[in-house]
Image (cartoon, grey):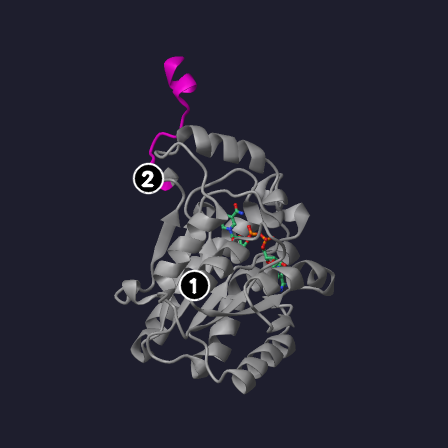
Amino acid sequence: MGLLDGKIALVFGVANKDSIGWGIAKRLHQEGATILLSYAAEALEKRVRPLAAEVDCDFIELCDVGSDEQLDAVFDKVKERYGRIDVLVHSVAFAPREDLGGRFLDVSREGLKIAVDISAYSLIAMCKRAEPLMPPGSTVMSMTYHAAERVMPKYNAMAVAKAALEIITKYLAADLGPKGIRVNAISAGPIKTLAAMGVPGIRTMLRFNEKTSPLRGNVSQDDVGKTAVYLASDWSTGVTGEIIYVDCGYNILGLTATEEDIAQF
Ligand code: NAD
């Protein structure tokens, strides 16, 4: 018996075996959910298909979340084949490379539009299409980062997109709550993935998090996957509109210096 037996889970954002979305898909599958995958671009298909096979998934659909037509097509196919969605996972983000790093003042108008559209608005676009398919008790979750609340080096356009994603999460929770649909976000600590490698200085962030976080470590895709199971299951029926940190406790710190730094004062 799994916590998610009989549930249909649609996961956006698996690019490869390092993706957080893949860590989530594996754990949801382990708890009994039927996994449906959507990926961003044709070039990724050869990596996603073998992963899909590992979780007995034969619903694998291409979708650029910036395209209303492609989103319509995916949700229509889910409706036709399964008739419902119990768990919707948004694990998608993109910002042009020039708008990550450098001075925040230099973020471009176009870059910010793209980052917010792909990384944040897309959650609204997905929920609009999912709502008619989601029964009471179903859940939506997205992936955010602490740069939405505190200034992090180089995160620039993506920080604005994550701030948008977090407030979108709360508004959607208020909108969909009366229908019994819960909407939450997981705020993960830094993890080495394709998207993270696009942020300059990510290796330093990983080392710093490891040295200073209360748990003295970095989280893994699997740590996020386990929290995703909690959010997808009946163990979180009273939880909506929340930003749940899975970051070894880094976000609670007021003073984020290493022990070596502190010893020098
Ligand atoms: P990843 O590169 O594996 O996943 C990002 C996904 O977004 C990829 O599958 C990519 O194909 C998809 N994507 C990008 N543009 C898209 C588009 N137009 N249409 C559809 N899909 C598109 O990296 P990840 O770190 O697993 O990122 C997943 C989520 O987790 C993102 O929202 C990211 O911001 C968030 N997050 C990551 C970290 C980290 O340190 N890795 C920390 C906190 C939050």
Numbered label attached to residue 152: none
Circle 1: residue type: Met
Q: Secondary structure at mark 1?
A: strand
Check disc 2 and report the residue beneath it: 252
The percent position of residue 5, horizontal first and vertical second, equals 39, 71
The percent position of residue 170, horizontal first and vertical second, equals 36, 64
Question: In the image, is residue 227 part of the stretch drawn in magenta?
Answer: no
The residue that appears at 52% across and 73% down in the rendered structure is 125
The residue that appears at 49% across and 40% down in the rendered structure is 152
Circle 2: residue type: Ile
Q: Residue furthest front?
A: 1
**Residues in magenta, as a range:** 251-265
The percent position of residue 164, horizontal first and vertical second, equals 47, 59
Report the side of 144 relative to 12 (left or right): left
Residue 148 seen in this snapshot: no
173 w.r.t. 119: above or below: below
Question: In the image, is residue 259 part of the stretch drawn in magenta?
Answer: yes
Q: Is mark 1 within 8 Å of ligand 1?
A: no
Check disc 1 and report the residue beneath it: 141
Q: Earlier in the sequence, mark 2 or mark 1?
A: 1
The residue that appears at 37% across and 73% down in the rendered structure is 138
Report the side of 22 relative to 16 (left or right): left
